[in-house]
Amino acid sequence: MFNRKFVSALGALITSVPALAYESSYNMPVGVTPVSHDVYALHMTMFWVCCAIAAVVFGVMIYSLIKFRKSVGAIPDKTLLHSTKMEAVWTTIPVLILIALAIPAARTLVTIEDTRNAELTVKITGYQWKWQYEYLGKDISFYSTLSTDSNEARQLNSGIDVHTVKDYLLSVDHPLVVPVDTKVRLLLTGNDVIHSWWMPDFGVKKDAIPGFINEAWFKALKVGHYTGQCTELCGRDHGFMPIAVDVLSKEDFERWVADQQAASKAAATADTSQATASTVAAP
């Protein structure tokens, strides 16, 4: 007979399984976009379906091992070699399960590829080892690279404790900025080798391939700061090519756009004035 403490511990473990599945850092993040929510729901549905199948299969196996063990006089039936009915059952049930899971999965895949009716379009170009963001129709363009504090701390013999660096290897100098509750269309390409733009909280992972334009989209439902990484091995410093996105309120985003456009216009004016001065000063 099982020890009472063992039974109590087993019961505690079983009751904690749902909490572990939903709250553990080893599980998928729920995310902050409709697509990430759909992907998470599919993941958990398939997880529990697999758990149910495992419970049935292992339950039957354990029952058979205990009920029909040799020590209680069980004798194998050498005449039962084939059962058409059983083969039909264990073929039909998995097929029905796969069909039931394929329908919502296909629906989610169609949603992931639907970039229509976007309210903002950003072209993303991957470089070794940085990202360029161009806001189409807004005259805003900038590069995003690993932040100075992370870059200094990562150097060999830097003497810097990386635990003291905020968002170590995940912080950038210029994050992508987007408005909340807005469908953002991404056009991704690469300038040198293949990169991959991955933002787990958005449910987006898309390759940036030189000579090709891949499309993706997201709609962040919550204001905040989110981080990701390049997930395609793109060279020696692949691990130092993070992604950061700041999701702002629509009012704050409009102010940010105005500030960026003003800065861009001022820089263009300064360049023009400098070029004119150089031309006049030339002999």
Image (cartoon, rainbow, N blue to C red):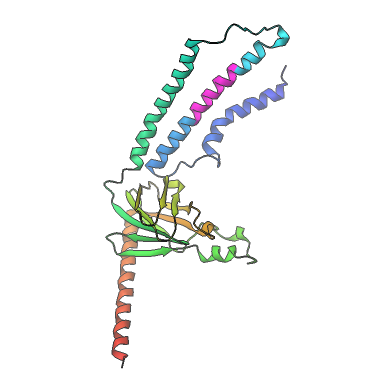
In the image, 76: left or right of 267?
right
In the image, 89: left or right of 276?
right
Q: Quadrant of the N terminus?
A: top right
- Residue 101: give x, y in percent of width and height: 41, 28
Q: Is residue 51 magenta?
A: yes
Residue at point 32% right, 70% down? 264
| The quarter of the displayed image where residue 158 is located | bottom right
| The quarter of the displayed image where residue 208 is located | bottom left
Q: Main secondary structure of the magenta part?
A: helix
| The quarter of the displayed image where residue 72 is located | top right
Residue at point 37% right, 37% down? 108
Look at the image and tell me whether residue 99 can be seen. yes
Residue at point 28% right, 49% down? 118
- Residue 107: give x, y in percent of width and height: 35, 34
The residue segment tinted magenta is: 47-60
In the image, 77: left or right of 111?
right
Look at the image and tell me whether residue 182 can be seen. no
Q: Is residue 55 magenta?
A: yes
Residue at point 55% right, 39% down? 24
